[in-house]
Image (spheres, grey):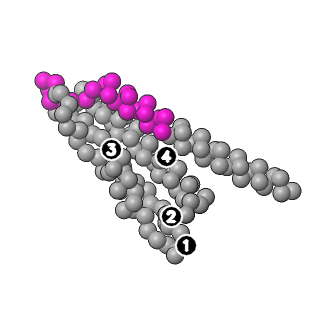
Amino acid sequence: MPEITDASILAALGRQLNTAVAKQTVAASNLANLDTPGYRTRDVSFDDALENQLGTMRRTNDKHLGQGTPDQGQTTEVDGLQSRRDGNNVQVDRELLAMTKASGDFSRAQTALAAKFRLVRYAINEGR
């Protein structure tokens, strides 16, 4: 079992923040194209984001992993959505729900990150 360290926790929180931003960006793009004829809804799935994130990591030292940034261009077309007469299949409710979920994911990671930094600040101030 891999060792859980501060670096791995911070890296995981960073990936969660990046994934949430990518999902919000794609949902906003879908909403922006609501009235574009022929536009097809795009999505970033967790599996794609995870695979992309793991693919961008590179070992810079035997003791740690380098961080890459997720390529937000890696999106897929969503299948199974009903199209309107103009060929557009964007659904406002679906996109607003996706933005809300991504916002919640971002907020949870941000809260955990803030708590981690409060612990570090506490440890530094108590050492004086």
What is the C-alpha distance between the residues marked 4 and 2? 22 Å
Q: Which is the main secondary structure of the residues drawn in magenta?
A: helix
Q: Which residues are magenta?
A: 84-105
**What percent of the width, then of the height, locates residue 97?**
38, 28
Q: Is residue 123 visible?
A: yes
Tell me if residue 3 comes above or below residue 107 in the rendering.
below
Tell me the kind of residue under disc 3: Val
What SS does tag 4 mark? Answer: helix
What is the C-alpha distance between the residues marked 3 and 2? 27 Å
What SS does tag 1 mark? Answer: loop
Q: Which mark is residue 44?
A: 3
- Residue at the far left in the pictured view: 85
Other residues around mark 3 within 10 Å, as few (<14) / some (14–19) / many (≥20): many
Q: Is residue 37 visible?
A: no
Tell me the kind of residue under disc 4: Leu
Where, by quadrant of the figure, is residue 54 drawn? bottom left
**What percent of the width, then of the height, locates residue 117?**
67, 49
Other residues around mark 4 within 10 Å, as few (<14) / some (14–19) / many (≥20): some
Q: Nearer the viewer, residue 40 or 93?
A: 93
**What percent of the width, then of the height, locates residue 9?**
56, 55
Q: Which mark is residue 17?
A: 4
Label 2 or label 1, whichever lies nearer to me, is: 2
Where, by quadrant of the figure, is residue 42 drawn? top left
Relative horizontal placement of residue 51, taking residue 60 as reference (left or right): left
Q: Nearer the viewer, residue 26 or 114?
A: 114
Residue position marked by numbered label 2 in the rendering: 2
